[in-house]
Image (spheres, helix red, strand yellow):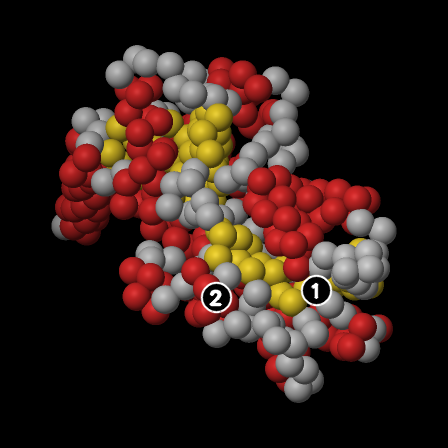
Amino acid sequence: MYNVKKLLSLILMLSITILIVACNNTTEMIDDQSYDDDNNLIVVGFSQPGAESAWRVALTDSVKEAFTEEKGYKLIYKDGQSKQDNQIRDIRTFIQQGVDYIILSPIVETGWDTVLEEAKEADIPVIICDRDVMVSNEALYTAFVGSNFAAEGKKAITYMENKYKPDAEGNLPRVNIVHIQGTMGSSAQIGRSKALEKGLEEHENWKVVAEGSGDFTKAKAKEIMKNALQQVHSSEIDVIYCENDEEALGAIAALDEAGIPHGDGTGITIISFDATTSALKLCMEGKISLVVECNPLQGNYLYNMISLLEEGEAAPKLTYVDEGQFTKDDLTEEFIDERKY
């Protein structure tokens, strides 16, 4: 009798095990079926450096709005958490998943050759957006869609040249500059910094009195500005050249804490890049003198690019998005309220 009970117990345990395995296999089949359904969509992997600013969030939202299931796309979004290693890992994940296209917004310009070669070997077109890459062979990526950062920087330099002209007697005004750089090695930092460096070479009366990388963040820029105020008296600062709006907000926070006036009608001119809503409002109030636009609404540009590739047509290698610049005379509340970022 004992052996019979033991045998029945073993049979019951075996039956439960078989049932569990069957259920697991059923789950895998459901997942596979779901994946098969996704195969009816064009799968796009999108790697972003992070979400460190309102500008970058606007870029992410723009891409998500462009590649929807209603339009025939499945978008896989990855946040690199401000680390290149994470982005490289994410691209390799896209390759393993067999996506149809990869969109890469690179945190820095260099260090992408190997992973882009892997994508090319997998026959997956890669479109670089926002910031550019510097690779040994441009055939490693299909196209670039984004900003002309050198042109953005030139707009800021032209503004400074017009503002700080020689007087009637030809005397050059002093132009002492606090330079708050972006993420070092990124296209935005390189283009905007080089424009200022060229301006310094061409104007002997221009001088950088303090400099540091704010990494495109408000907190780090605020610390740089506070340190600058310890090194240089505020009366000796003429321009604060911030390489994005978040950095401008950080610099302004440091000035406000120190009780130092800034903007139009004061001794300190603040220049910023991106043209997010918060910066434009400060510009309209005269607290920021110039905002150079860096357009994050690149989703439709990318959508049109991939649509061309899907139709078997050649895509342009280089596409710059439309961008402008703003002073308080260019702005109204209605204009700012209508903007998407």
Tell me whether the residue at label 1 lies in contact with that at label 2, contact meaning CB atoms closer than 8 angstroms. Answer: no
Disc 1 marks which residue?
Answer: 239
Nearest-to-viewer mark from 1 and 2 = 2
Nearest the viewer among 243 and 260 is 260
Q: Earlier in the sequence, mark 1 or mark 2?
A: 1
One can see residue 183 in this view: no
Indicate whether 142 appears above or below 279: above
Label 2: which secondary element: helix
Q: Residue 94 placed where, x, y %?
A: 42, 32
Q: Is residue 149 left or right of residue 171?
A: left
The amino acid type of the residue labelled 2 equals Lys
The amino acid type of the residue labelled 1 equals Val
Say which residue appears at 65% left-offset and 67% top-offset. 269
Say which residue appears at 34% left-offset and 50% top-offset. 61
Which quadrant is the C terminus positioned in?
A: bottom left
Indicate whether 130 appears above or below 261: above
Q: Quadrant of residue 41?
A: top left
| Res 19 label | none
Q: Residue 290 placed where, x, y %?
A: 56, 60
Nearest the viewer among 61 and 153 is 153
* 10 Å crowding of disc 2: few (<14), some (14-19), many (20+): some
Q: Residue 76 placed where, x, y %?
A: 34, 40
Task: Measure how far apart labels 1 and 2 are at the Cα level.
Answer: 17 Å
Q: Is residue 39 left or right of residue 228?
A: left
Disc 2 marks which residue?
Answer: 328
Say which residue appears at 81% left-offset and 63% top-offset. 174
Say which residue appears at 78% left-offset and 77% top-offset. 235
Q: Residue 239 placed where, x, y %?
A: 70, 64
